Image (spheres, grey):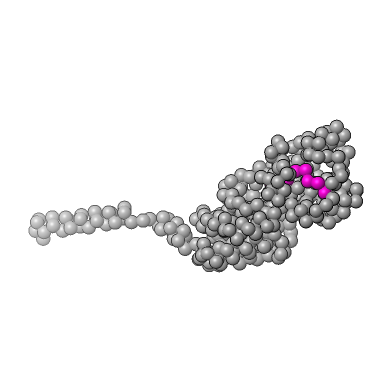
Amino acid sequence: MSFNVKRSVRQLVGAGLVAGLAVLTTAPVGPIMGSAAVAQEFPSKPLKVIVPFKPGGRTDVVARMMGEKIKENGWLSQPMAVVNADGGAGANAVNQMKREEADGHTIVHWHHQLLIASAMKLGDFGLDDFKSIGYTGGGSPVWVVREDAPFETLDDLVAHLKAEPRSLVEAVGIGTIPHFVGAMLANEAGFETRYVTANSAADRLRLVLGGNADIALFAASEFLAQGDGLKALVYFGRERLPDMPDVPTATELGYDVTWANPNWWLAPSDAPDEAVTALAAALEKAINDPEIVKYFNENTLEPYWTSGAEAMADAEKTLEQLNAVAATIQ
């Protein structure tokens, strides 16, 4: 082979190598392609929403309504099927979630009962097992006394209990939401009550109206449905409820206690961020839909969206308060 021919071959090979390198440096690499594919393909199959309660309760109803609204508007390309897994203080639902692939197609719809279960160490799970998708509204309770009680405001009641500790009886079920919310307020305001056992709203109502208890906690809807006989001193929501415009929130009275019991959507802790982002976008649209807003307003619930990170920060703060209460009963 002549010198000129050899040089031409080397030039051609060199040009080919340069072109090949150009292709390699400009073409997307594997992980970027994979990430884009996840974002474009999610959801690639029907979604499973696990509710840790029996059918018919608020958490179950809201999950189904939200899923139907998302499907109706095509905010996700796959339907959401609600699966009820009650029992085990939520452990049954968490374990079912963990048995599925952590790809974002299986999520949990719960509320802050999760935090009470965690504080009471009732299940082998905690916040580290979840990636927060966000809150879609919630419902808050009121602290009430009898209508003829000599307390017109929460400050009146707190002043009485500080002057005469444990002089009033509070109807609660130990380890329940009424117990924990009342104890959080007591810890924050610096007072003590005495307890009488009441494991249901009907029990609490009977004890208060019958004069065997002085204070009890009720869902806002339960209080409004009862009508006569009770007087609400404080509401534990973030803002005053339109149906009870004269009942102040604990926070506006200076007590850092809220209990929104939010509709909390949770994915496995190692679910892809792209999947969580897609779910959050659909849920935020759903909670702002006029029909959903109307349902919430008509059922003394508060419709709002809270992002995943903000919801987790709120939950962590609330869990600290619950842990302080749990330490007194364990």
Q: Can residue 277 be seen here? A: yes
Q: Residue at x 58, y 58 (%)?
A: 290
Q: Is residue 150 magenta?
A: no
Q: Residue at x 11, y 59 (%)?
A: 5
Where residue 103 appears, as percent x and y from the top left, is 54, 60
Where residue 188 appears, as percent x and y from the top left, is 74, 37
Where residue 211 appears, as percent x and y from the top left, is 90, 48
Front-lying residue, 102 or 315: 315
Q: Is residue 250 left or right of residue 192?
A: left
Front-lying residue, 278 or 304: 304
Front-lying residue, 118 or 182: 182
Name the quadrant of the N terminus.
bottom left
Name the quadrant of the C terminus.
top right
Locate residue 162: give its quadrant. Answer: top right
Up-down: is 46 above or below 4?
below
State which region is magenta: 230-237
For the stretch drawn in magenta, what is the main secondary structure?
strand
Locate residue 9: give its quadrant. Answer: bottom left
